Amino acid sequence: MKFTKMHGIANDYVVLNGFKDAIPNPGRFAKQLCDRRFGVGSDGLLVVLPSKKADFRMRMFNPDGSEAEMCGNGIRCFGKYVYDHGLTGRKRITVETLDGTKTLDLAANGSGVKSVKVDMGEPRLERPEIPMTGRGRAVDEPMRVAGRNFRFTSLSMGNPHCVIFVKGVRKFPVAEVGPQIEHCRWWPKRVNVEFVEVVSRREVIQRTWERGAGETWGCGTGAAAVCVAGVLTGRTDRRILNHLLGGDLVLEWGKNGHVFKTGPAVEVFEGEI
C-alpha cells in the first residue's frame, strides 16, 4: 500500500488514498503507521474517501487508534493532497468530516498548493455540546490541577478543547499538566489542552497537549479555539497571529460566527508499506 507523509506546521500525518486501497480497520492500522519507531511515524492517520455529501470525505485517526471528529492541520494537508494528486482541479472544495462539511480555499501555483484557508464553522460553547459535564458555558472558570491554580475556557471546534492562558508558555510543564486535564472527568470524551501566552491583542504563542497523541507541534482546531477563547475573555482581538512550535497560523472569528484558519501544508515524501 502506498502512503504519503505530510505536515501542517510540523503536525505530521500519514495519508492513505481510500479511492485506491481498501482499509478495513483504520484505527488499528493507525497504531502501526503512526509509531515513530516501528512504523512511518506521525501525529495521525488521514484517509481520503469519496463522499455523498461533499466533494470528499476525511477520516482522521490518532496514534492510539481513536478517531477524531475534526483536525485543523490535517484538513489542510488533505486539501493539498487531493489537488496535488489530481483528484480535483478545483481550488474551492468541500470535505465531509465527523464535525460536518468544511469548505477549503486552496492557494495553488504551478508547483501545487502552498496554503489552505479553512472555514472551521461556528464554535460550540454550551457544555453539553463540547461535551463537558454541567450546564451553561465554561468561560474563564477556575481549576486546580497538579498543585496549581488556573482559569480555563472550554469549547468545541468539532472536538473538545480546554484553553488556559499562562505566562512563560515556552517553559511551561505541558507534559505534566496536559495529561491530567486530558483525562479529567469533566470531559467524558477527553479533551485537547491549549496553553497560551498573550503577546498582544493580535498575537499569541500556543503549546498543545493533544488527546491520544501527547504534545504536538501544531493543532489547527486548538488554534481556532484559542482565537475564540481570547475574544470571550477579552484578551485578544477577533483576528490573531498564532505562533505554534511548528509554525504560524492566522485565525479570525468572523462576524458571521465562523472561525477561519489559514496556514501552510507540505508534502514530505511518498513511500510504500
Image (spheres, rainbow, N blue to C red):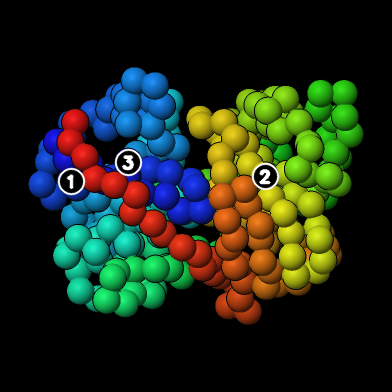
- Above or below for 239 versus 82: below
Classify mark 2: residues with Cα within 10 Å, few (<14), some (14-19) or many (20+). Answer: many
Q: Amino acid at mark 2?
A: Arg
Q: Secondary structure at mark 1?
A: loop
Observer-nearest residue: 112 or 162?
A: 112
Q: Is residue 42 left or right of residue 24?
A: right
Which mark's residue is nearer the viewer, 1 or 2? 2
What residue is rendered at 19% in x and 47% in y?
Answer: 17
Q: Amino acid at mark 3?
A: Val
Give the Cα distance between marks 1 and 3.
13 Å
The label shown at residue 248 is none
Q: Is residue 139 left or right of residue 194?
A: right
Which mark's residue is nearer the viewer, 1 or 3? 3
The N terminus lies in quadrant:
top left
Let me know if residue 191 appears in the view.
no
Residue hosting label 1: 18
What residue is rendered at 43% in x and 68% in y?
Answer: 115
Let me know if residue 17 appears in the view.
yes
- Above or below for 166 versus 223: above
Give the Cα distance between marks 1 and 2.
32 Å
Pointer 1 or 2: first along the chain: 1
Q: Amino acid at mark 1?
A: Gly
Residue 216 in the image: x percent, y percent? 56, 39
Residue 82 in the image: x percent, y percent? 24, 61
- Above or below for 179 versus 243: above
Q: Secondary structure at mark 3?
A: strand
The label shown at residue 207 is 2
Residue hosting label 3: 14
Residue 253, quarter of the rendered image = bottom right
Pointer 2 or 3: first along the chain: 3
The C terminus lies in quadrant:
top left
